[in-house]
Image (tube, rainbow, N blue to C red):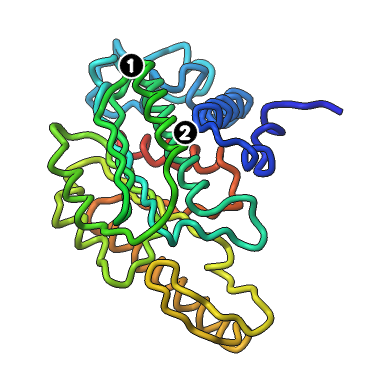
């Protein structure tokens, strides 16, 4: 039987790993390997050194070798153009501890794997990367940096984070804003399920639209489909509020409500200039990286 990186990247394989440095390396290497094999990748073998050509760019910066291979124009991006701050925000409240009936991951582990992989990519590009993870009991903040020891420290710190307590979004997002010294990328990873917080309004209030900002919403299929058959007691992991219900009798109304909430949240983010990605915990991690980088590339057009 043949083995390859994609096999090692399977959901079952990554679920057994606790070293986020290793997880990030495997995920990113597999993603890049897939790019190089795809006839439609459009980015060439030096993906991280190119961006889409836009009218007004000097012709001398077009890479004609890439054009010959892809029939598309890409401009060379110099180090000083791409070196900026990538601020990764990771919600570690108790609601992220949920693990569905048909997945190998809790929402938090999946979120942490996304955070680790994006930090690893940013470091590969020479960007300064920071991490803020928070709940009302613990806070982890790693200031921006891009040395080898820095990324190792950042990824190691992710391994020590446990989802617990309440989120306190406004308090810690305000903390991050006060620590930002220049414009860059802000990546917010959360389930964004908090009826007490109007996230788009909070992002707008804190000035996130002035940055290249993206909200990554991580949800489990249980939260989207409500697949349970028998009567269930649902307990809010952050408030301990309980409700006893028969999922079958409310499933259709529930699915409409959660779908409406997600769509409204997405549109509200887009309306204020914040990009949005929905990620499900049973989704291949390379698909998430592809969606993120395609979104980032679109913003540079």
- Nearer the camera: disc 2 or disc 1: 1
* Most foreground residue, 35 or 262: 262
- Circle number at residue 60: none
Where residue 240 appears, as percent x and y from the top left, is 42, 74
Q: Residue at x 58, y 63 (%)?
A: 221
Where residue 231 appears, as percent x and y from the top left, is 63, 85
Circle 1 sits in a helix, a strand or a loop, which is it?
loop
Whole-number angstrom distance, CA of label 2 to CA of label 1: 16 Å
* Most foreground residue, 63 or 228: 228
Indicate which disc, 2 or 1, sits on the residue closer to the N terminus.
2
Tell me if 45 is positioned left or right of 271 in this view: right
Q: Residue at x 50, y 15 (%)?
A: 68
Tell me if 49 is positioned left or right of 29 in this view: left
Q: Residue at x 44, y 30 (%)?
A: 156
The quarter of the image holding the N terminus is: top right
Q: Residue beneath label 1, please?
A: 147
Mark 1 is surrounded, within 10 Å at the Cα level, by few (under 14), some (14 to 19) or many (20 or more) other residues, namely some
On screen, residue 24 above or below 270: above
Q: Residue beneath label 2, please?
A: 117
Q: Residue at x 22, y 50 (%)?
A: 173
* Most foreground residue, 295 or 183: 183
Where residue 211 appears, as percent x and y from the top left, is 21, 41
On screen, residue 125 above or below 229: above
């Amino acid at each position: 039987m043949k083995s390859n990186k994609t096999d090692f990247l399977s959901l079952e394989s990554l679920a057994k790993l606790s070293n986020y440095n290793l997880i990030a390396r495997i995920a990113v290497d597999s993603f890049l390997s897939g790019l190089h094999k795809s006839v439609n990748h459009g980015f060439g073998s030096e993906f991280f050194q190119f961006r889409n050509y836009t009218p007004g760019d000097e012709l001398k910066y077009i890479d004609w070798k890439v054009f010959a291979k892809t029939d598309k124009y890409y401009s060379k991006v110099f180090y000083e153009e791409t070196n900026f701050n990538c601020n990764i925000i990771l919600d570690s409240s108790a609601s992220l501890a949920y693990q569905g009936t048909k997945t190998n991951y809790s929402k938090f582990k999946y979120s942490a794997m996304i955070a680790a992989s994006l930090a690893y990519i940013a470091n590969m590009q020479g960007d300064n990367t920071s991490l803020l993870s928070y709940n009302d009991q613990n806070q982890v903040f790693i200031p921006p940096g891009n040395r080898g020891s820095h990324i190792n420290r950042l990824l190691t710190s992710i391994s020590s984070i446990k989802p617990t307590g309440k989120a306190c979004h406004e308090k810690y997002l305000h903390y991050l804003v006060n620590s930002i010294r220049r414009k860059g990328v802000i990546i917010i990873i959360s389930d964004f399920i908090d009826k007490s917080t109007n996230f788009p309004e909070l992002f707008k209030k804190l000035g996130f639209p002035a940055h290249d900002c993206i909200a990554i919403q991580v949800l489990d299929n249980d939260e989207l489909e409500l697949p349970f058959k028998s009567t269930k007691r649902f307990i809010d992991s952050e408030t301990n509020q309980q409700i006893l219900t028969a999922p079958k009798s409310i499933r259709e109304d529930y699915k409409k409500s959660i779908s409406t909430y997600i769509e409204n949240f997405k549109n509200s983010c887009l309306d204020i200039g914040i990009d949005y990605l929905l990620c499900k915990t049973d989704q291949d991690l390379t698909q998430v990286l592809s969606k993120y980088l395609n979104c980032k590339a679109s913003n540079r057009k």
